[in-house]
Amino acid sequence: MAKQKSDPNYKVIAENRRARFDYAIEDDLECGILLEGSEVKSLRVGGTNIAESYATVDDGELWLVNSYIAPYEQAKMFRHEERRRRKLLVSRKELSNLWNATQRKGMTLVPLVMYFNHRGLAKIKIGIAKGKKNNDKRETEAKRDWSRQKQRLLKDHS
């Protein structure tokens, strides 16, 4: 996920850190986002949240629902809606795979990270995920705690 630091255009805008805790991510996919002008400027400034959002396939199109992009203060006349549905751009083949995953296999489409790629275009990484049960979440947390503890022990003894 982390690109080279020398790349001036690559910048993470928003990250859904809770997604990997709540869901078992099986695959991910990079999508383009259809944005209005003031939304792009607002993304460059910051103030975006994708934590409560999700993606869905409706009428043969992929949509990002409930994502928040803060209003851009300098845009007086042409302001955007903060929580509107935004169309995501994927190929037809990828779209059919996503539809099969959600409708037939009972998977969920969760946004993982929104960023500007190396060309300066706004992209979003969608995870194809299955919801975790509470005991799976506890198991993940226990593994994370143990790996942290292991790192501390190695650091102290070396």
Image (cartoon, rainbow, N blue to C red):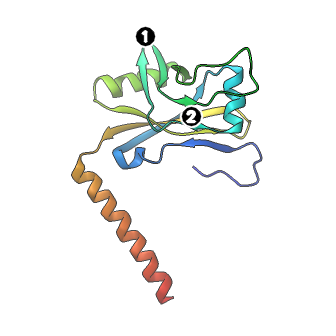
Q: Nearer the viewer, residue 68 or 138?
A: 68
Q: Is residue 77 above or below residue 24?
A: above
- Asked whether, in this view, residue 146 is left or right of residue 4, the answer is left
Q: Quadrant of residue 82?
A: top right
In the figure, is residue 107 to the left or right of 7? left
Three-letter amino acid code at the position of disc 2 = Ile
Q: Position of residue 144 (x, y in %)?
A: 38, 63
Mark 1 neighbour class, 10 Å CA radius: few under 14, some 14 to 19, many 20 or more:
few
Dots 2 and 1: beta carbons under 8 Å? no
Judging by the rendered image, the residue that carries numbered circle 1 is: 59
Q: Please report the residue visible at 50 percent of the width from the left and 82 percent of the height from the top.
A: 155
Quick check: 41 left or right of 28?
Answer: right
What residue is shown at x 33% (from left), y 60% (from top)? Answer: 141
Q: Residue 89 has which mark?
A: none
Residue for badge 2: 124
Determine the residue positioned at 62% across, 38% down.
47
**Nearer to the camera, 13 or 126:** 13
Q: Position of residue 118 (x, y in %)?
A: 72, 41
- N-terminal of the pair, mark 2 or mark 1, is 1
Vertical comparison of 123 with 37: above or below: below
Q: Amino acid at mark 1?
A: Asp
Instruction: Please tell me whether mark 2 sits on a helix, a strand or a loop.
Output: strand
Question: Which residue is located at x 42 percent, y 40 percent?
Answer: 27
Q: Residues within 10 Å of mark 2 (few under 14, many from 20)?
A: many
Location of residue 81 in the rendering, given as x and y in whole percent from the top left corner: 58, 19
Quick one: which residue is furthest to the top in this view? 59
Q: CA distance from mark 2 to mark 1?
A: 21 Å
